[in-house]
Image: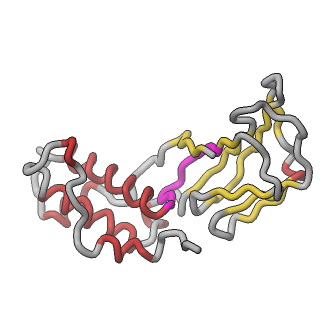
Amino acid sequence: MTLIRTVEPSAEPVALAEVKAHLRVDHDSEDSLLEGLIRAARQEVERATGLALLEQSWRLVLDRWPRSGCIAIALHPVREIISVTAYGTEGEASLINPADYQVDLVSRPARIHFSKVPPALRALNGIEIDFVAGFGEAATDVPDLLKRAILLLVAHWYEFRGGFGPEDQPVSYPAGYDRMIAGFRPGRL
């Protein structure tokens, strides 16, 4: 199972102006550094929580149909299934009719249950599921606690940017960061 982001979010959940106000920076000379830190902090929060914060497109690639007929999508929240494509043994692509599967976008992980599946797939990467994930298109759709976690990471990394080289980053995570994102991490059994 491989997840591939096909379209990045069009914005960041935290604006440059918010970060500059938080850091009390009133000059423009480090704007590109701060924008990079915002992007890195968003990616870290998404990685640590298994969430897509702002709307973005993804592709899930699988080798075979699960025996149960149910595919779980670990990324959350899934907003829409765009298409399901199966590749036959000769590499021919066929779209699966949406009437042949049922989608549960409420659960975490989101699930797709197939009533009918093509019998033969190519050996590798035989199934592609394109979907849209994220809380919404605007920063106001992202939970405030996750935006605070991004601000905390940006401030921490900004403070320690000179003491360590790029190969050493991230140097550390600030106190309280794990508590801020703990409620958004997927449950473990």
Camera-side residue: 91 or 58?
91
The quadrant holding residue 6 is: top right
Instruction: State whether residue 68 is above or below residue 8.
Output: below
- Identified at 83% across, 33% down, the residue is 94
Q: How far across and down, in percent of the image, does residue 56 sit?
A: 54, 49
Q: How far across and down, in percent of the image, does residue 152 sit?
A: 25, 67
Image color mode: secondary structure
The quadrant holding residue 63 is: top right
- Left or right: 110 with respect to 149? right
Camera-side residue: 13 or 109?
109
Camera-side residue: 100 or 62?
62
- Identified at 70% across, 33% down, the residue is 124
Q: Is 29 part of what is drawn in magenta?
A: no
- Identified at 78% across, 24% down, the residue is 91
Q: How far across and down, in percent of the image, does residue 168 sit?
A: 20, 47
Can residue 18 be seen in this snapshot?
Answer: no
First to last magenta residue range: 50-60
- Left or right: 106 with respect to 70? left
- Identified at 74% across, 65% down, the residue is 104
